[in-house]
Image (cartoon, rainbow, N blue to C red):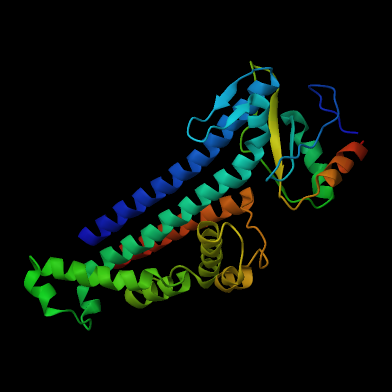
């Protein structure tokens, strides 16, 4: 039951994190709408950024609102959705492998690690962390193949994996290629690629929402399947 | 021409650097505007919230992809009866 409880706690925390990230997105949109409305009603202000030295009037700020929301805000929250989800996958695997260390019984390790370890749990954690560090750099299809091989939960489905792979490819383009889709994006995104080589990624709100829904569903499905299996 | 019922002015499409076009309209006109947009196959989304100032009528924002031609949206709204 300890593993089931730990998975339940992880699931609840991750779903809370995803909800908070989406709440931040909506609340920030509302805040900007309020600024737009106030300026429309005749409010005047000047914004000084002491860090950059930028100075904007209220009309200059309002002219930036649509870009701030549809680009910076949408992209930043989208990247955070994927980061939260990625963290879930690896925390889930850490829990699973730590609970069933015999899965990794064929792994080799230096005798020095054994001699320096405080106890068997420390050795297990070392082996599990080393294993996960190797999986971390694989594409999502690799993560989920590993998950299925080790836990046999039947989730996510192949359609879900394809959608997550495309979203992760968008996230990678935003994080590592100034938001520009490249051949690497096309390779990672597969048949669901939305952008051509050289095109700027755009996170439109229906897509932002659909990926948020998908990640929440997959977190819940994996967690529920695992809890049912170990309970 | 579609007129904003709050201002009695034509509904105007806003264009901003680095963003797709947007339109702010009275919430009460949302369905009429959506019919026009849907009829011409635009990709758009509507804010999840409407805003009312000092108890006045609610307004809502419609967003379009960066790939959308703002002039085309304006032309559709201007030609609507």
Q: Quarter holding the N terminus of chain A? A: bottom left
Q: Position of A154 compared to A197: left or right?
A: left
Residue drawn at 51 percent across, 61 percent down: A176
Q: Residue A220: x, y in percent?
A: 41, 57
Is residue B32 positioned above or below A74 on the image? above
In this view, the residue farthest toward the front is: A53
Query: Which of the pair A21/A103 is nearer the observer?
Result: A21
Q: Please tell me whether residue B40 is drawn above or below residue A198 in the rendered image.
A: above
Left or right of residue B22, residue A64 in this image = left
**Is residue A115 something that shows in the picture?**
yes
Q: Is residue B52 visible to us here?
A: no
* Image quadrant assignment for residue B32: top right
Q: Which quadrant does the C terminus of chain A fall into?
A: bottom left
Residue A214: percent from the left, percent from the top?
Answer: 52, 57
Residue A103 percent across, percent down from the top left:
25, 77
| Residue A129 sits in quarter | bottom left
Instruction: Name the residue at 92% across, 39% down.
Output: B79
Is residue A52 or residue A101 the one in the foreground? A52
The number of numbered badges drawn on the structure is: 0
Residue drawn at the location 85% of the way across and 40% of the way down: B74
The residue lying toward the viewer, choosing from A180 and A79, is A180
Residue A71 is situated, as x and y percent measured from the top left of the image, at 61, 47
Q: Is residue A62 above or below residue A96?
A: above
Q: Is residue A206 above or below residue B56?
A: below
């Amino acid at each position: 039951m300890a593993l089931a409880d730990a998975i339940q706690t992880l699931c609840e925390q991750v779903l809370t994190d995803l909800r908070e990230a989406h709440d931040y997105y909506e609340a920030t949109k509302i805040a900007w709408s309020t600024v737009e409305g106030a300026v429309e009603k005749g409010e005047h202000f000047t914004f000084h950024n002491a860090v950059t030295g930028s100075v904007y009037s209220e009309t200059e700020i309002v002219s930036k609102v649509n870009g701030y929301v549809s680009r910076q805000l949408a992209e930043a929250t989208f990247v955070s959705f994927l980061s939260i989800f990625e963290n879930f996958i690896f925390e889930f695997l850490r829990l699973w492998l730590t609970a069933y260390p015999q899965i990794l019984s064929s792994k080799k390790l230096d005798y020095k690690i054994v001699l320096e370890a405080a106890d068997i749990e420390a050795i297990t954690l070392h082996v599990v962390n080393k294993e996960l560090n190797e999986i971390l750099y694989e594409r999502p299809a690799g993560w989920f193949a590993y998950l299925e091989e080790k836990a046999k939960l039947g989730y996510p489905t192949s359609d879900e994996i394809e959608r997550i792979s495309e979203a992760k490819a968008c996230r990678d383009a935003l994080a590592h290629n100034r938001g520009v889709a490249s051949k690497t994006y096309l390779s990672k995104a597969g048949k669901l690629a939305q952008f051509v080589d050289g095109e700027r990624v755009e996170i439109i709100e229906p897509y932002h929402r659909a990926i948020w829904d998908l990640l929440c569903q997959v977190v819940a499905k994996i967690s529920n399947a695992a809890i049912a299996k170990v309970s | 021409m579609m007129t904003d019922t709050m201002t009695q002015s034509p509904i105007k499409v806003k264009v901003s650097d680095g963003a797709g076009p947007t339109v702010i309209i009275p919430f009460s006109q949302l369905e009429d505007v959506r019919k026009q947009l849907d009829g011409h196959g635009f990709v758009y989304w509507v804010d999840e919230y409407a805003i009312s100032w000092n108890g006045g009528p609610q307004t809502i924002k419609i967003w379009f992809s960066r790939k959308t031609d703002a002039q085309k949206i304006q032309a559709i709204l201007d030609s609507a009866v």
